[in-house]
Image (cartoon, rainbow, N blue to C red):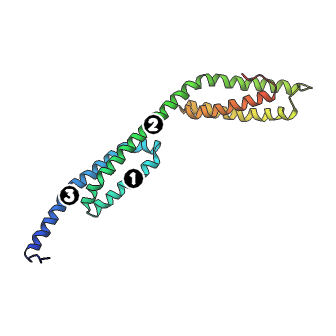
Amino acid sequence: MKKLPVWLLPTLLVLALVGCANDKTPAEQAVASAEAALAQVRDVAQKYAPDQLQAVDAQFNGVKDSLAKGDYKGVLAAMPGLNSAISGLKDAASAKQADAEAAAAKAKDAWGPMSTDVPKMVDAIQSRVDTLSKSRHLPRGVTKDSLAAAKSGLDSMKSAWSDASNAASSGDYSSAMSKAEAVKDQASQIMQSLGMAAS
């Protein structure tokens, strides 16, 4: 390999620096653009796709490190993958948000009938417990233990129903329905243990 003339070295160095400088502005712009795109999707992604957001953040931080080290070519080479990851994150978070909103709307619709039915069941159990507590003889199939369990069950159901109602009042119908379903299941079991026809 021939040695380069000494006078050519400074020229090559200048050309190399110019090449780096030419990459610097596009690299900085690309990182700023990616940062802005990530900021737009961050809140929704934090709520609906946190694991994926964490992975994209790690990828973005790697690109920022390359920029800080002056590896502009590396930054530009990494940008298509990063932009694709941000786009995928946005799509995933939007899809999960849409699913959550659809589920919330469904839960809101279901809350209406549930908010009528469950209190009726609890009231019926309360009435039955009051009647049986005054009775000298329990009906066939109803034991003292099942009556005692029904009494303590009433307290926990009323507390859980209060939680469900509070969740519905704050607009969290998904949680409200989840709690209400649990109360309804418990009420059905207690009604059965007390010889009542579950509605």
Secondary structure found at label 2: helix
Q: Residue furthest front?
A: 1
Instruction: Determine whether 65 is above or below 93 in the image.
Output: below
Instruction: Give left or right: position of 160 versus 150.
Output: left
Which quarter of the figure has residue 178?
top right
| Real-space Cα separation, disc 1 to disc 2, in angstroms | 20 Å
Q: Position of residue 182 (x, y in %)?
A: 67, 34
Question: On the rendered structure, is 176 left or right of 52?
Answer: right
Q: Measure the alpha-carbon separation of dots 2 and 3.
A: 38 Å
Give the residue number, with chain letter if any, for mark 3. Answer: 23
User: Taking the image as drawn, is residue 38 in sight?
Assistant: no
Indicate whether 125 appears above or below 18. Answer: above
At 32% from the left edge and 57% from the top edge, which residue is drawn?
63
Query: What mark, if any, has residue 57 been given in the picture?
Result: 1
| Label 1 – label 3 distance at C-alpha | 23 Å
**For the C terminus, which image quadrant?**
top right
Check disc 3: other Cα within 10 Å, few if <14, some if 14-19, many if 20+.
some
Secondary structure found at label 1 = helix
Residue under the point 29% across and 52% down = 79
* Residue linked to disc 2: 97
Kindly tell me whether residue 47 is visible in this rendering.
Answer: yes
Left or right: residue 65 compared with residue 96? left
Q: Percent from the top left, x then y, of residue 186?
A: 72, 32
- Give the image location of residue 165, x and y in percent: 61, 30
Q: Quadrant of the N terminus?
A: bottom left
Q: Position of residue 49 (x, y in %)?
A: 45, 44
Which is more N-terminal, label 3 or label 1? 3
Q: State the image quarter where residue 28 is shown.
A: bottom left
Horizontally, is 70 left or right of 138 in the view? left
Q: Nearer the viewer, residue 1 or 44?
A: 1
Amino acid on which disc 1 is placed = Asp
Q: Label 3 amino acid?
A: Asp
